[in-house]
Each structure stands twice: as C-alpha cells, then as structure tokens.
Amino acid sequence: MEESLMKLSKFEGQLPHDLVFKILERLSFKSMLKAKSVCKQWRDVVSDPSFIEAHLSKSYSLGRIRYIHGAPMMKSVGLDDQETRYEHTIPTTEFSRYVEILGSCNGLILLGDGDRSYFLWNPSTRLLRSFTGRFLFRGEFRHFALGYDSTTRAYKVVRIVRVHSHKVYDRFKAPSYEKSVYDVTSAHVYSCKTNSWKKIEHFPYVIFEDAQGVTMNGYPHWIVFWDHFVEYKDKVIVVIVYFDLVEEKFKELPKPSWLVESSSYSFGSFEGKLCFIHYTTVRQREIREIWVMEKHGESWINVSSKINIKRVILRGWSSGHPYANYSREKPFIGAQYVESLVSPYAGNDMAG
C-alpha cells in the first residue's frame, strides 16, 4: 500500500481534485493517515471537513466497525476481522478505575469518569476532549447517549437520571415519622457546540436500570415505561422513545405486539436498523426471534426466517443494556464505533 501511495504521489498537481477525493475516501483509516503525509494536496484533502464527512459515510457503507471495551485500558476488535485486536493508548492518568463507556456516535466515544467528569474521545485519532456535568450520585439510575444534530452540525449528549427512595416504616415510631417517597427523574442535553447543558422539562417516563442509548440516524433510543403512578395507576406500559436532537424533545415509536413488561429481549441496532432479539420459550426450548424496523417510525417485522441469529450477534450487533429482562449484558462496558476523522475539538461543524 505504501509503495502504491508513493507512486500516486508523483502525479501531485496533475490528478483532478475530485479524483483524489474519491480515491482517498475509500482507503482504510490507517492507509489514509499515511496518505495524509505523502504530499500537500492529499493532506489538504484529508483535512477538509467535507472529506471527513464523506469518509465517515464511506466507512459506514463499507462496514468498518469496531467494538471497544475494557475501561480504563481500552481494547478494540474489528467486526469484519476479529483477529485484528490492539490496545488503545489513552491518557490514563486522567481517568479513575470507575471510568465508563457511555455511548458512541460517528467514531466518537462518550466516556464518564466519577461524579461529573465527561470526555469525548476519538479512539482512531486518539484526540480527547473533556467537559463537566451536573453532580451524579452513586446508585442513581442513568440513561446516557451521544447523538448528532445534523441541522446545527453539533454533537449532543443526553443524560437521564432517576433518584428514588422507598417508604420506610419504623414500627417503634408513630406514623407521622414515616419517611416519604422520593422519586424524581430529570433529563438534560449537552451541546458540544455551545459547551452548555439544558434541562428537558417534559419526561413522563420511568427508568428502572442503567441504559446506554441505541443511536440511530443520530437519534438515541431507549425502552422505558410510562409514569404509571400518574397516568395509568397500577398498569405498566412499555414504551420505545427516542430523543429528537433537533426539537430537543422525547418522542415515541411503535412497538412490537409482543413487547410487554414481562418480555425477555435485547434491543439494539443491526445494519443501520433498530432491532430486537426476542427470547421466548416453546416446549421448554428457547426460541430467539429477530425483529427489525425497516424504516424509522414504521411497524416492526419478524425477519427470523431471513437472518441468521449468529450473524446478528457476532457481526454488526450494537445494543443498549438496560433492564434485567432487557439485555443479558451489563451497561456501559463497551460500544461499537466506526473509524473516522471526526474531531472532538472541531469547530462549528464538529468534523475536522
């Protein structure tokens, strides 16, 4: 590859810009970094925000996806070639052993460390950006996600936190000493463009465990419950919600007919579509069904007869990890990401 790049470099200034653009955007990330140092023309192309966006799109279409895990010493593996393992070197002195992987979007990883420290990190370029958030108490239920607002060209962090306590009765004291129930859920969004947090006023849902959002088309998605104590009394209603980063509002999606409180499933994405793995038992034998939403906002389709379950799990499966019946994995231990040049330090377009 290096020899081929050097031969092409002899044509510097002779090759049309559009042709150079098309050639470079198809290169793997490592080859492209080498190409960047070949000549000034190529360096200028690779540094152009429009090229960074085009390369990002090409990386998605070519399936250049990796899975990263193992905080604070991160390791990643390529989903196309699981033999290509390597460790990422990051400034570990800035992290405690409590650092978590909270989400990812367009090659950027969202990390959380401690009570209010957050980081945007590109594991491909090794660039790291820090910011702070509101204090987070240990033991709170948390939903996190990183998304992209294409209208303002800004990355945004969504944080949903529930603080609650149960009634405690002391049989040695009068009823007037009964401790009251405290149950408050708050949602905030952080804009990387403005470097500021904003509270989302309306969140009529209940979360029961930690969850990493499933980001599709830049929007993070979760499985939650209606605030049944207010709206439905004793009923528990399962809801699929996503956060519209443009309007900065939570919206609901249709759900599969089988999705109820007692359902057993994993929720995530596969090949650019929202996806469920539904676990059922028939005659003491576990059955796993694959359900996908072909177009965002439309109905769910059972594609079990068309897609091998092993293909979904082993290649391209990216899941959020909330409730005990929601997924069989723990949240915040890993995330998928695409190799990209997107910079956490970038300007208005957050691209280069």
Image (cartoon, rainbow, N blue to C red):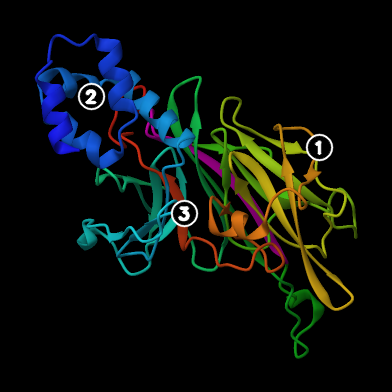
Give the residue pinned by disc 1. Answer: 299
Q: Is residue 184 magenta?
A: yes
| Badge 2: residue crowd in 10 Å (few <14, some 14–19, many ≥20) | some
Q: Secondary structure at mark 1?
A: loop
Q: Answer with mark 1 or mark 3, whichever residue precedes in sequence.
A: 1
| Marking on residue 335 | 3
On the image, the x and y values in percent for residue 148 come to 49, 32
Secondary element type, mark 3: strand
The residue labelled by disc 2 is 47
Is residue 136 placed above or below 157 in the rendered structure? below
Circle 3 packing at 10 Å, graded few (<14), some (14-19), many (20+), is many
Q: Is residue 203 visible?
A: no
Percent x, y for residue 182? 68, 62
Residue 350 in percent (x, y) is at 35, 28
| Residue drawn 57% across the image and 33% down it | 217
Q: Between marks 2 and 1, how big is the CA–CA gap? A: 41 Å
- Residue 305, given in percent of the width and then of the height, sits at 78, 51
Instruction: Using residue 276 as the reference point, say whether residue 216 is left or right of it.
Output: left
Examine the image and state in which quarter residue 209 appears. bottom right
**Residue 70 visible in rendering:** yes
